[in-house]
Amino acid sequence: MSEVTIAVEQRNEFGKGAARRTRRAGQIPAVLYGHGSDPKHLSLPSVEFARAIRENGHNAVLTLEVAGSGKELALTKTITAHPIKGYIEHVDLLLVKRGEKVTVNVPIVVSGDAASGALVSQELTEVEVEAEALHIPEQIELSIEGVEIGTQLHASDLKLPKGTTLVSDPETMVVNVSEASASMEEDSASEGEEAAEEAASEEA
């Protein structure tokens, strides 16, 4: 995960009205807290912050150039988005130090194909881990290539990067590989036939 530097401003106005004015100005209201320090109310540039999250994930670590008070290293802790329109309403940032370990949730990405006739159910999409603030994995991949029907994979089966330790219960199920029902196999075969027919008609 790369470091991202963002120039931010301190906010002196609070409340819903002030937050709306901040967002209209192309900024995102944010609060920086941690290490026993008083919370700092900040304004983040919307475009730069959205790019940082898109390129580094929701656990992005930012170097904040705070106007009037130097640089701060911060972990993106909570992002609150509008439930309908989707824009970012508010961000909570956690003050961190280089070398410090933090606890975060990291997405699990399942890759590969299980044995023929298997139905794969992903029961867990994120796992809680502890890692150094500047070495948080963007995602953790779990391969199910060739996994047999009846197999259950748990959090303890995840291969974590060096320096990352599991915080979630190791017995938590991540993937369950069961036998697909006959009706599901028929639906899948039917979809395959329809796709083949469509491809043939397009070529014709």
Image (cartoon, rainbow, N blue to C red):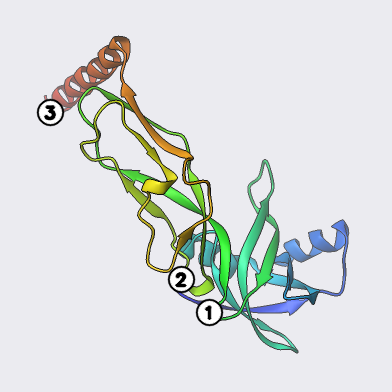
| Residue 99 tag number | 1
Dot 3 amino acid type: Glu
Q: Which of marks 3 and 1 is nearer the N terminus?
A: 1
Within 10 angstroms of label 2, few (less than 14), some, or many (20 or more) residues?
some
Quarter occupied by residue 68: bottom right
Q: Name the residue under label 3.
A: 203
Q: On the image, numbered disc 2 is attached to which residue?
A: 135
Mark 1 Cα shell of 10 Å, populated few (<14), some (14-19), many (≥20): few
Name the residue: 43% across, 48% down: 108
- Three-letter code, disc 1: Gly
Q: Which is nearer the N-term, disc 3 or disc 2?
A: 2
Q: Are marks 3 and 1 in contact (CB under 8 Å)?
A: no
Q: Which one is in front, 96 or 26?
A: 96
Secondary structure at badge 2 equals helix
Alpha-carbon span between mark 1 and mark 2: 9 Å
Q: Is residue 21 left or right of residue 199?
A: right
